[in-house]
Image (cartoon, rainbow, N blue to C red):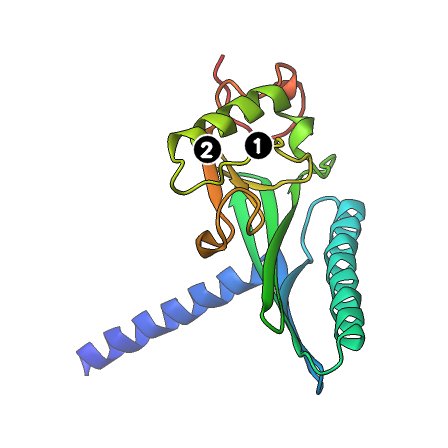
Amino acid sequence: MRTFSIIMLMLCMILMHSGGVTAESQYKIVHKDQVTENWEIHADYPLFERLENEEMQEDINHKIVQKLEDTFRMVKRGANETMGVSSLYYEETTVYKEKKFYSVVMTSHITQGDRYNSTVTSINFDDMDDGSIKMLNDFVHMDRLNNEVKKVLESDPDMYIKEPFAGVRDNTAYYLQEDHLVLVFNKFEIAAGVHGTPEIILPIEGLLKENIHETNVPFPSYT
């Protein structure tokens, strides 16, 4: 009997803890599925509910939904223009959190007949009262970043394409991982399609703009 009571107590504690984790989530996941004769759409995406800055939260959710709707329209239009060729659109979204800095990385996988592609975008922001959406060029020196990326590309010519590197786009998808910056490239952008959407991980030291710590962005300090 005593053993049974201990087990029941432990189960109750686990259930209470699990409920707390769910309640504290900053966002909910929305599922969208539509299937017709000419196209299929399957998407999982987050909508934020508990950010400190409500105005920014509305803006972020709008950007997420707008991005999906724009892709929906493109896929449907393409399916209508190529009758008899089915289109499949799958949206994969991952939310990364580093301290108070969030990155919503959205990957669109689109297949039309024997053609396929994957493109990646990200919405990056700091969850604070005065938080804002951050593009790459808001906090890193793009010239230094390009130099570091070129070194990585040149270090493995068997994996990366040999064409001249055009440079990191200002809207290249990214997220933070401790003291590293992770860039996520589109399929075929820097490597063959077999490598999917390749990531390049770089130490963030030396890339940050000098005035970044005058803001509230939670990047590591090296001074």
Q: Is residue 115 above or below residue 221?
A: below
Mark 1 closeness class: few <14, some 14–19, many ≥20 residues within 10 Å: some
Q: Amino acid at mark 1?
A: Phe
Left or right placement of residue 53 versus residue 163 in this view = right
Q: Nearer the viewer, residue 184 or 130?
A: 184
Mark 2 closeness class: few <14, some 14–19, many ≥20 residues within 10 Å: some
Q: Position of residue 73 (x, y in %)?
A: 80, 67
The answer, for residue 141, to whether it is visible in the render is no
Check disc 2 and report its element: helix, strand or loop.
helix
Left or right placement of residue 7 versus residue 69 in this view = left
Q: Nearer the viewer, residue 63 or 109?
A: 109
Residue farthest toward the front in the current orientation of the protein: 163
Q: Position of residue 67 (x, y in %)?
A: 74, 57
Q: Is residue 41 above or below residue 127?
A: below
Q: Position of residue 216 (x, y in %)?
A: 65, 28
- 3D distance between C-alphas at marks 1 and 2: 9 Å
- At a point 45% along the width and 52% down the height, the residue shown is 195
Residue holding disc 2: 153
Check disc 1 and report its element: helix, strand or loop.
loop
- Whether tag 1 and tag 2 are in contact, CB under 8 A, the answer is yes
Q: What is the quadrant of residue 160 in the picture?
A: top left
Q: What label sits on residue 199 in the rendered view?
A: none
Q: Amino acid at mark 2?
A: Leu
Q: Position of residue 199 (x, y in %)?
A: 48, 43
Please state the total of marks drawn on the protein image. 2
**Screen quadrant of the N terminus:** bottom left
Q: What label sits on residue 165 in the rendered view?
A: 1
- At a point 52% along the width and 51% down the height, the residue shown is 197
Q: What is the quadrant of residue 114 in the picture?
A: bottom right
- At a point 61% along the width and 20% down the height, the residue shown is 143
